Image: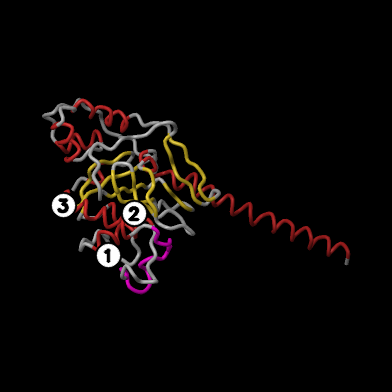
Amino acid sequence: MKNKNNKNFVKFICIALAIPLAFMGITFLLQDVYAHKDGYFIPDYKRVNLTENTDYKTIFEQTGLGKSAIDKLKNEGDFERIFEYQEYLFNPPEISCNNMLFSFTKEERMVDDFVDFVDLQPGDILISLSTHSMGWRHGHAGIVIDKNGVLESEVIGTKSKINALSHFTTYGNFAQLRLKNITPEKQEEIATFCEDSLTDIPYGLTAGYFGDKAPNLDSKNLRVHCSYLVWYAYNYFGYDIDSDGGRLVTSHDILHSEELEIVQIFGMNPKEFIK
């Protein structure tokens, strides 16, 4: 009987050790292998010489800068700055993948470097796919309030708030988007609304999934997560930027919305956004 009890005890210990080891192994494969297969983009096509007469499509493929950003550089007589963004695309800075919630959630950041926005305006949408949990690149999203601040909803247990712009300029990848044909005045109106009405809203992982997709501002049920916060702000003004129209609004849904245009991308494949 004693030998049988000893064998059962050993079996129990083996199982007790095997389960967390297996979980750690699965987490590693998802977070450090699978999630990184779609990490920072480095072009597999040829680098070319750019001039002010080069077409927009080619400049976009070579730099990640959209039409409005290119036009701003040209109008300011600062076209040579475009070569900095071409260099970043073809020779990216060092990227580090850091733990946010133990190893279950990680985010990729540039090491001792950052990338400036060429044409940043209040109301612009910022998306990054640098954040991943258990292999899923759910990313992060925010709305530009002014040249120094971005409204974000970050994590469970917090409320939406305005963070420094540097929170996005150091990500391993990001996209800056703008509603097509929107006026600066309307963008400013949206940014002001966000600052006045959408700060200090509790985080809700299932925001918009149950009940009304867009509850009233004064609703006790109003909760937000990062991408839902962005969607809610624009939906309030009559713009639906959820590309698949589902109940769950993700960073991917906004990133690929037909209602938006690319102003600038970094660390993403430009060819994925060429229609």
What is the secondary structure assignment of the residue under circle 2?
A: helix
Q: Residue at left 24%, top 55%?
A: 190
Residue 202 spot, x, y in % from top left: 42, 62
Q: Nearer the viewer, residue 203 or 106?
A: 203
Q: Residue at left 72%, top 56%?
A: 14
Q: In the rendered view, would you say 257 is above or below 271?
A: below
Tell me, for residue 182, which label it has, or none: 3
Q: Is the residue marked by circle 3 packed among few (<14), some (14-19), or many (20+) residues within 10 Å? A: few
Which residue appears farthest toward the bottom when viewing the image?
211
- Badge nearest the viewer, 3 or 2: 3
Place residue 95 in its image quadrant.
top left
Q: Please name the amino acid that badge 1 sits on.
A: Gly
Left or right: 228 as drawn, with respect to 123: right
Which residue bears the numbered disc 2? 251
If you read the primary sequence from the N terminus, does the residue marked by circle 3 or circle 2 appear first?
3
Q: Please name the amino acid that badge 3 sits on.
A: Ile
Residue 168 spot, x, y in % from top left: 36, 43
What is the secondary structure assignment of the residue under circle 3?
A: loop
Q: CA distance from mark 3 to mark 2?
A: 21 Å
Q: CA distance from mark 1 to mark 3?
A: 21 Å
Q: Quadrant of the N terminus?
A: bottom right
Q: Please name the amino acid that badge 2 sits on.
A: Ser
Tell me, for residue 245, which label it has, or none: 1
Give the residues drawn in magenta, as a range.
200-215
| Count of numbered circles in the view | 3
Residue 121 spot, x, y in % from top left: 23, 44
